[in-house]
Image: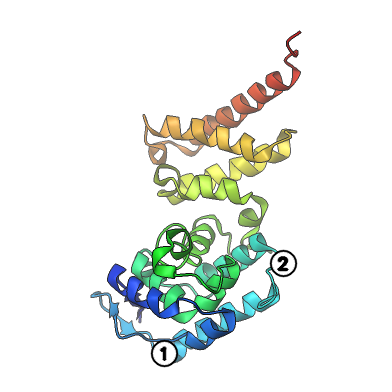
Amino acid sequence: MTEIYPRLSPAGVLVRAHELEWHNLEELEGLAVASHPMETRGASGGMRIGEDRLLDLSDKIFHVARKYGYPAPIRSRSDFDADLGELLALKWQVPLADALHQDTWSFLCLCLVPHIVAWRFSVPSKTVLAEEKHHLNHFAGGNRNALQRTWIRAYKLGAPDADDPVWLVRELLEDTLVGIFERPALSSNRHVALQIARMAFEAQKQFNVDNLERFHREALKLVRARAAVRYLGALPSHELRELLQKCWFDVALALQEESVEPSPA
């Protein structure tokens, strides 16, 4: 039977954020809880997930963090994010009905593992969380939520049967992943997001460019321009691939021409 996860509304987010202010990492770990007075549950059928199960999830997240140095400074943010996404999307498999609801991730980050979030994003101990949006964004549900962002990447780009199910997530730059997953036109369709990510990976292997971030950023701008006038999800796979190839090829050509352009006298 499907498990129903607790959620924290925007009002609950602010209440919980005030509860967590001015605490260091060790204190935040002590404030982690598996329930909260302001939590709610989805109305869909299923069984409420128990606190013991939530604590088990918290323990698994903790072990991923320990692998990358917790509570010492994080050793590899990209690998931590990839492993965390694999845990949430492919191993633990947070139910889709809850995973697609931002309030679920608000609860998990603010209640279950606030210490892991603060550690991952180096949130200062004297932070007034409710008033500092750039920090709160990593706790509240949304595309910058510490857990949600890793789940969506692994869910849409993961290959469960591969030796490393999240190899594609590891291979792409953070800037490129953000460029894909913070743009609904590129990421809302799972097939489209996967094809874009694969093309980015192929292009960075094929073309010798000095600035990969700029290379992918400019190519994704072209993809977004195409997506503005046609729905990419409706294209046959071969047409979508050709469209994407042309975007990266055009940018590679432009960068090459730019690099050989003679300097003004």
Residue 94 in the image: above or below residue 248: below
Q: In this image, 146 relative to 214: left or right?
A: left
Q: Identify the amino acid type marked 1.
A: Glu
Residue 190 in the image: above or below residue 137: above
For numbered disc 2, what is the local secondary structure? loop
| Coloration mode | rainbow
Given residues 122 and 222, the one toward you in this image is 122
- Badge 2 local density, few (<14 within 10 Å), some, or many (20+)? few
Q: Pointer 1: what residue?
A: 51
The disc placed on residue 174 is none
Whether tag 2 and tag 1 are in contact, CB under 8 A, the answer is no
Given residues 218 and 100, the one toward you in this image is 218
Q: Pointer 2: what residue?
A: 75
Percent position of residue 185, x then y: 40, 42
Asked which quadrant contains residue 98, the reply is: bottom left
Percent position of residue 250, x then y: 60, 24
Percent position of residue 234, x then y: 38, 38
Tell me the quarter of the image containing the N terminus. bottom left
Residue located at (39% from left, 68% from top): 130
Q: Which numbered disc flags the more N-terminal residue, 2 or 1?
A: 1
For numbered disc 1, what is the local secondary structure? helix
Q: CA distance from mark 2 to mark 1?
A: 30 Å
Given residues 72 and 230, the one toward you in this image is 72
Residue located at (71% from left, 23% from top): 256
Q: Residue furthest left?
A: 43
Q: How many marks?
A: 2
Q: In this image, 161 relative to 223: left or right?
A: right
Tell me the quarter of the image containing the C terminus. top right
Disc 2 or disc 1, which is closer to the eye? Answer: 2
Residue located at (52% from left, 73% from top): 126
Q: Identify the amino acid type marked 2.
A: Arg
- Badge 1 local density, few (<14 within 10 Å), some, or many (20+)? few
